[in-house]
Image: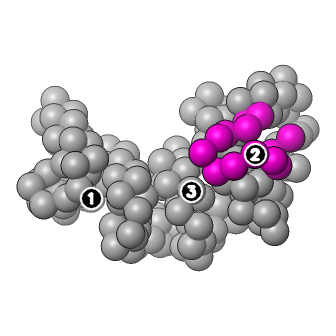
């Protein structure tokens, strides 16, 4: 269901989300797709998992170690941008949090503007949960709002506005 077509399409990812939400036993299979040999399957699996995490973040707790590990090692941009916003939805230990923050900072050097923008989002989300991160994330957002790509500038302004509320 995740194969076929081209990278500009999410294929049947939304149908997979519905199926997993109705039958959670399929989540294991979907998680395994993140390590598929096919880049398209990995991309669509990440999209579906990220959408599931919006509704049922607790379902991903048991995969936390694998997902945090993948965040630190993955090169594929589509996985990076989905993991950047998914990881902050998980209950992280101090070491996992430090690793996630380091990975998201590395993502700011990615050539993809989307990866950079979602890395900012992930860092902002983490800073809401972990106040000690706020000063450095605020500084990063302020800088990105001046010097980033158009998408980074827009997202940074939005995140700064939320941070000040």
Q: Nearer the viewer, mark 3 or mark 1?
A: 3
Q: Give left or right: position of 116 versus 69.
A: left
Residue 7 falls within the magenta-colored stretch: yes
Label 2 crowd (10 A; few <14 / some 14-19 / many >=20)? few
Q: Which residue is mark 3?
A: 78
Q: Which residue is mark 1?
A: 133
In the image, residue 77 above or below residue 88: below
Cβ atoms under marks 2 and 3 closer than 8 Å: no
Chief SS of the magenta region: loop
Question: What residue is drawn where x is 64% and y is 51%?
Answer: 7
Residue 85 falls within the magenta-colored stretch: no
Q: Earlier in the sequence, mark 3 or mark 1?
A: 3
- Residue 60 seen from this side: no
> Disc 2 to disc 1, how far (Cα)?
41 Å
Q: Which residue is mark 2?
A: 5
> Disc 2 to disc 3, how far (Cα)?
16 Å
Could you say where residue 74 lies in the image, as x and y percent from the top left?
60, 71
What range is drawn magenta here? 1-13
Could you tell me which secondary element the residue under label 2 belongs to? loop
Could you say where residue 56 lies in the image, as x and y percent from the top left?
66, 32
> Disc 3 to disc 1, how far (Cα)?
25 Å
Q: Earlier in the sequence, mark 2 or mark 1?
A: 2
């Amino acid at each position: 269901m995740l194969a076929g077509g081209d990278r500009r399409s999410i294929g049947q990812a939304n149908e997979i989300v519905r199926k997993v939400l109705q039958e959670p036993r399929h989540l294991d299979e979907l998680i395994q797709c993140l390590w598929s040999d096919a880049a398209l399957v990995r991309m669509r699996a990440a999209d579906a998992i990220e959408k599931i995490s919006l509704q049922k973040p607790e379902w991903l707790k048991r995969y936390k170690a694998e997902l945090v590990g993948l965040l630190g090692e993955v090169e594929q941009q589509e996985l990076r941008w989905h993991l950047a916003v998914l990881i902050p939805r998980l209950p992280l230990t101090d070491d996992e949090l430090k690793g996630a923050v380091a990975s998201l900072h590395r993502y700011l050097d990615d050539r993809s503007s989307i990866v950079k923008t979602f890395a900012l989002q992930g860092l902002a989300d983490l800073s809401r949960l972990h106040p000690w991160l706020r000063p450095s994330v605020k500084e990063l957002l302020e800088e990105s709002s001046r010097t980033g790509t158009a998408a980074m500038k827009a997202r940074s302004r939005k995140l700064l506005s939320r941070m000040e509320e």
